[in-house]
Image: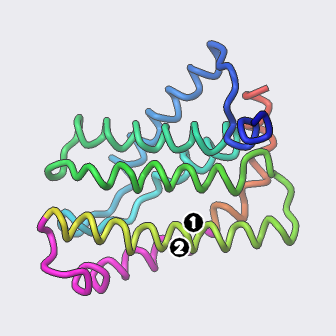
Amino acid sequence: MQKIKNWLGFRKLDTKAVALLGIFVALTMVFTMYSTVRVGNSIEVSLKFIPVFVMGALFGPFFAGITCFLGDALSVILFPVGPPIIGMFLTEFLSGFFFGAFFYRKYEMNVSYIIRMVVCVVIQFVLSIILNSYFLVDAGYFSSMEAAISIRMVASLAKAPIQAVVIIFAPFYLKAFSKLVK
């Protein structure tokens, strides 16, 4: 049981950790607001994954998922672009969770890091294409899954290399950030 808790990043949070979590939620909101290119209400390319990725690497899957969820939920409440789609919050949680699952306390550039990066980017792509498209069809933004996937494919294909580049260069800055967490 302890091994699972360690892998998920469960631990007692001190004041510094809670403050950092709050900062990363705020950063997620800022990145959502100022680094997002939107085409309509259903297609977006954003850099909001950067603070979530850093959260996952520093605090683990659970806290990265919660940070991503809270950042998205607060962004929808404070800066609405359309009506909230509850299922999208699940996708945001899973997105943060997978960043944490693949990169929690793993800051060394090696072959396994590259493999984790490729798998994680593919998972993020699938979450964006399949789950988000499903929730957008369910909410009435698209008439069918085929239409949603074909339209959202462009944004997801644009986002994948951006995520890969950020993750590739992450070991250069994660070691410095990891000193904040200890």
Q: Is residue 58 above or below residue 135?
A: above
Q: Is residue 20 above or below residue 28?
A: above
10 Å neighbourhood of mark 2: few (<14), some, or many (≥20)? some
Q: Residue 67 vs residue 99: left or right?
A: left
Q: Residue at x 22, y 52 (%)?
A: 85
Q: Residue 56 vs residue 81: left or right?
A: right
Q: Amino acid at mark 1?
A: Gln
Q: Is residue 180 above or below residue 137?
A: above
Q: Quadrant of the C terminus?
A: top right
Residue 34, horizontal then vertical, whole percent: 36, 49
Q: Residue at x 22, y 84 (%)?
A: 147
Residue 154, horizontal then vertical, whole percent: 37, 81
Residue 135, horizontal then vertical, whole percent: 26, 64
Residue beneath disc 1: 163
Q: Is residue 182 magenta?
A: no
Could you tell me which secondary element the residue under label 1 belongs to? helix
Residue beneath disc 2: 160
Q: Residue 70 vs residue 53: left or right?
A: left
Tag 2 near tag 1, CB within 8 Å: yes
Residue range corresponding to the magenta coloring = 140-164
Residue 17, horizontal then vertical, whole percent: 64, 22
Q: Answer with the quarter of the image where residue 13 lies.
A: top right
Could you tell me which secondary element the residue under label 2 belongs to? helix
Q: CA distance from mark 2 to mark 1?
A: 5 Å
In the image, 150 versus 91, the foreground residue is 91
Q: Answer with the quarter of the image where residue 171 lies.
A: bottom right
Q: Is residue 157 magenta?
A: yes
Q: Residue at x 67, y 37 (%)?
A: 59
10 Å neighbourhood of mark 1: few (<14), some, or many (≥20)? many
Q: Amino acid at mark 2?
A: Ala
Q: Residue 152 vs residue 156: left or right?
A: left
